[in-house]
Image: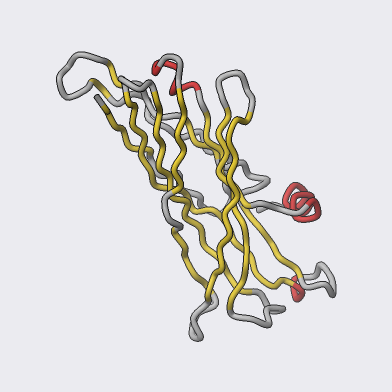
Amino acid sequence: MTIACNLRRASALGVVLVAAVGLSACGTDPFGETPVPSCPRTFLPSDTAQITEFSPKGRDLTDVVFEAGFEGYAGECSYDLEDKQLDILISPQFSAQMGPAATDRTQHLQYFVALKNPGGEFVQKSVFDVDLAFPKDADRVRYSDEQVALHVPLADVTYGPDYEIYMGFQLSREQLEYNRRFAK
């Protein structure tokens, strides 16, 4: 038997703080027999929730090629009680803005989705490429990527809510240091 829950969307207004958002409880299965475990919490750490790409010329505001920031996510999780598996579908959502140093209307970035087990170890991480195309008449875009699927075998489904999902931009060391110093 498979039972499902929805992940709530985290909303980021300006600064994306660590968003510990999940369902507190989904209730019971349709037959009223088994309590449905909640979905794992999802985090958008502030130091990876934004990306600023600079031209090689410098680090001034006039050297910004583009900026992007996570807006949140949409998703769901389900538990296969017979196979003892947690299945997660999550779709990240972010916005981006071209900067004064942009020379191309298509910009490339990467984001990650990672899963931490109850013992605090990251057991899955996938990095995804995105090519953002800015229309001729717009310097801002919103983007929702396809759903990312995570499949987690569990010894006991009651441990499912103890897992954690992390999302953010895949950053260079310089971009990460910039975020830690100047993140909005």
Residue 126 is situated, as x and y percent measured from the top left of the image, at 58, 45
Residue 98 is situated, as x and y percent measured from the top left of the image, at 61, 74
Residue 34 is situated, as x and y percent measured from the top left of the image, at 25, 15
From the viewer's perspective, is residue 171 above or below residue 65?
A: above
Which residue sits at x=47%, y=63%?
143
Which residue sits at x=51%, y=86%?
136
Q: Residue furthest bottom?
A: 136
From the viewer's perspective, is residue 14 above or below residue 117?
A: below
Which residue sits at x=44%, y=43%?
149
From the viewer's perspective, is residue 174 above or below residue 67?
A: above
Q: Residue furthest right?
A: 57
Q: Is residue 43 left or right of residue 181?
A: left
Residue 155 is situated, as x and y percent measured from the top left of the image, at 45, 15
Image quarter of the N terminus: top left
Where residue 130 sits, quadrant-wise, is bottom right
Which residue sits at x=82%, y=72%?
56
